[in-house]
Image (tube, grey):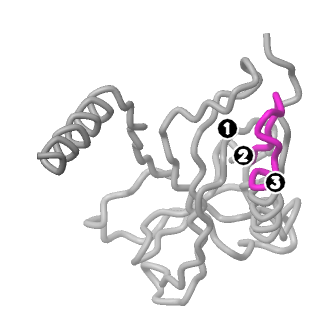
Amino acid sequence: MRTAARIFLVSLVLLVSSAFAQEKQVRQQRRPPEQPKTASSAPQAQTQPTYQYFSILNGMPMLLELHHDTERFTGKPIDVYDFVIEMQVVNSDGMLEPVGLQIHNYYTANAMDLQTTPNPNNARDCKIWNGLVTSAMQNRNPLSPTWPYITFTVAEGARTIQTKEDGQVWWSDDIECWGAKDRFPPF
């Protein structure tokens, strides 16, 4: 009898707790957007951006993976990073507030043109900042009203290349990363 009562009580607690639990709905998005793989024409020439305007993504680094891909039209090997960042509400009330949107950012491991790029080490810098921000988050005091995050920027008009495995990816010449910290106290 006691065993049956315990099983009933545990089942009831699990049922009630699951009814009130709010699971974070994780959504995925890809940047740059996927291009149709049916296009058979060779890529068009792209001009280098002016680097005056950028899209900015702030958030928690979730994953940084290096893929060994192949350039779609030439068959040449090309290394590509998949940098997954979960968007965060920044400078809000001091609480970590992920919005549940994980954005996969694809970019090359090497610059397109070492002679004209403002920073040929952008991909390496993103890897370094990913490690620093991830470590800072793991060692963060849970009572701290601020938190570290990664800032990932893409130049307006960023150039892309097509790969067989990961599709359209940005050239690392046209992206940047750095770490930052939400510096405002709670409202």
Give the secondary structure at mark 3. loop
Q: Nearer the viewer, residue 96 or 124?
A: 96
Q: Residues within 10 Å of mark 3 (few under 14, many from 20)?
A: few
Q: CA distance from mark 1 to mark 3?
A: 29 Å
Horizontal arrangement in the rendering, residue 148 relative to residue 112 (left or right): right
Q: Residue at the location (75% across, 36% down)?
A: 53
Query: Reading the chain from its start, which is encountered first: label 1 or label 3?
Result: 1
> Is residue 151 within the magenta segment?
yes
Q: Nearer the viewer, residue 172 or 74?
A: 172
Quadrant of res 122:
bottom right
Quickly name the residue at label 1. Answer: 55
What type is the residue that disc 3 sits on?
A: Asn
The answer to whether mark 1 and mark 2 are in CB contact below 8 A is: yes
Instruction: Point out the stretch of residues depicted in magenta.
Output: 137-153
Q: Which disc number belongs to residue 153?
A: 2
Quickly name the residue at label 3. Answer: 139
What type is the residue that disc 2 sits on?
A: Thr
Q: Residue at the location (47% across, 63% down)?
A: 168
